[in-house]
Amino acid sequence: MAANMPLEEIGREVRNIIADALKRPVEQVPLTASLESGLGIDSLAMIEINIALEERFRFAMPDMASPAEANLKTVEDLSRFVAQQLAHQKGRLV
Amino acid sequence: MTALNLELRHPDERVAAQRTPEEQRAHEAREVAQHYEHNPEIFSLVLDKRLAYSTGVFLSPDEDLETAQARKFARVAAKLNIQPGEKVLDVGCGWGSLLLYLAQHTEGQFHGITLSSKQREVALQRARDWGVAERVRVDLTHVEQLNPAPESYDVVLFSGSIVHMHNREVIHQLVGRTLKPGGRLFISDCYFPAEMRGDRDSSATRYIFVTALGYCRLLSLSEELNLIERAGLDLLHVEDLTSSYVHTLGHWIDNVRRNRERIEAMAPGFSKVLQGYMTVAKLSFAKRTALEYMILATKGAPKVHVAGWPIPGNAR
Ligand SMILES: C[S@@+](CC[C@H](N)C(=O)[O-])C[C@H]1O[C@@H](n2cnc3c(N)ncnc32)[C@H](O)[C@@H]1O
């Protein structure tokens, strides 16, 4: 179940999803990459990534127009955020 | 009267402005229809039971979608005060949400038009199911090709549809001619704030206006009101529904989440398009970089009396 998936695995999935959305090889999306200044994730890319995360982990992400709005700077921040949300929502959809 | 110079606010509008009216009409008919030609069952998983594809009216954020849409129908009915035998044109009637509600609750004669043949079929089937088919007609046509006789309708409605139409001056002149004296125009749709607020050239804006919905043109409210006045109508009432739209979109997005697998089984990729454009819209209305209004206007002496409003129009 997604709710008790180890952080490492979540991080891997998050990197894959971001790479997919940006159409880049996953090697170019390390956990340390900055979402906005490094990867250039704009409002639409953020929304698309969040939807892909929801599809993959079957939970609901909060609304955000940019990573900064949720205080997320790096890919790792986003992975931790997903892990927290998953633990919190226990796989509930909405 | 010289033509009004409407501001071109988005790159796709600037492209549209280069086309001839015929080219733009064909563009709208083709691009806009695509969205609405998706399997109607998908929309029945996302919208309220009457399939209203425009904002409800929420008195509080805790209300459910059915309550808010029922209140909207009742409020619009109260605004229009349709009398027995009056003729109503619903431009962009969708699957017949408002059209059929009004047919069931008044004794008017109803004519809906849409760009989607699937929507037309659903609207007509429901008209039969609900026993109002003899007073409801639905045609597949672009409004600019309708050519209605002068002074032939008592009411003209645009609910969530005028946003798809580029040549707004032409549309308003058509409405002005087509309404009988005492006729009413009703619009429920979204607008840009008059001053620049937010990024209108962003990929998010393009996604909603072009990728998801085919063609959209948001005027400022004052531009639309100006066009209505220049067509010879008088304004009766304008109401802001921006926060209601935030709540409506929130319900629709949750319904997409709940039904993701079923939607994907019917149209692969479409749940992402729906959730994506609805999220962009929800964030825009929440930040008021886009605004939602209901507009009511009359041709000549009004048949509705707005002095006593706020109108009740409560959901029953
Ligand atoms: C968002 S839906 C709203 C449906 C309905 N009025 C409601 O509120 O539930 C927009 C509708 O407008 C129709 N539409 C858009 N442009 C149109 C045009 N130029 N002529 C006729 N219908 C049009 C579409 O086919 C669709 O049915």
Image: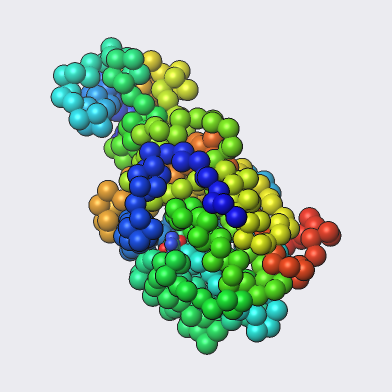
**Residue with the most extreme bottom position:** B134
* Residue A27 horizontal/vertical position (percent): 16, 19
The quadrant where residue B237 appears: bottom right
The quarter in which the N terminus of chain B is drawn is bottom right
Q: Is residue B68 left or right of residue A2?
A: right
**Residue with the most extreme top position:** A32
* Residue B263 horizontal/vertical position (percent): 32, 55
In the foreground, B234 or A72: B234
Q: Is residue B114 left or right of residue A39?
A: right
The quarter in which the C terminus of chain B is drawn is bottom right
Q: How is the image coloured?
A: rainbow
Residue B7 seen in render = yes
**Residue with the most extreme front position:** B1
In the image, residue B199 sits, relative to residue B117, either above or below, namely above
Q: Residue at the spot x=68%, y=50% of the render?
A: B239
Q: Residue at the spot x=42%, y=25% of the render?
A: A66
In the foreground, B85 or B245: B85
Residue A58 seen in render = no
In the foreground, A91 or B43: B43
In the foreground, A63 or B172: B172
In the image, residue B117 sits, relative to residue B108, either above or below, namely above
Q: Residue at the spot x=61%, y=43% of the render?
A: B243
Q: Is residue B230 left or right of residue B300?
A: left
* Residue B185 horizontal/vertical position (percent): 63, 64
Q: How many marks?
A: 0
* Residue B78 horizontal/vertical position (percent): 71, 66
Q: Residue at the spot x=50%, y=41% of the render?
A: B7
In the image, residue B300 sits, relative to residue B255, either above or below, namely below
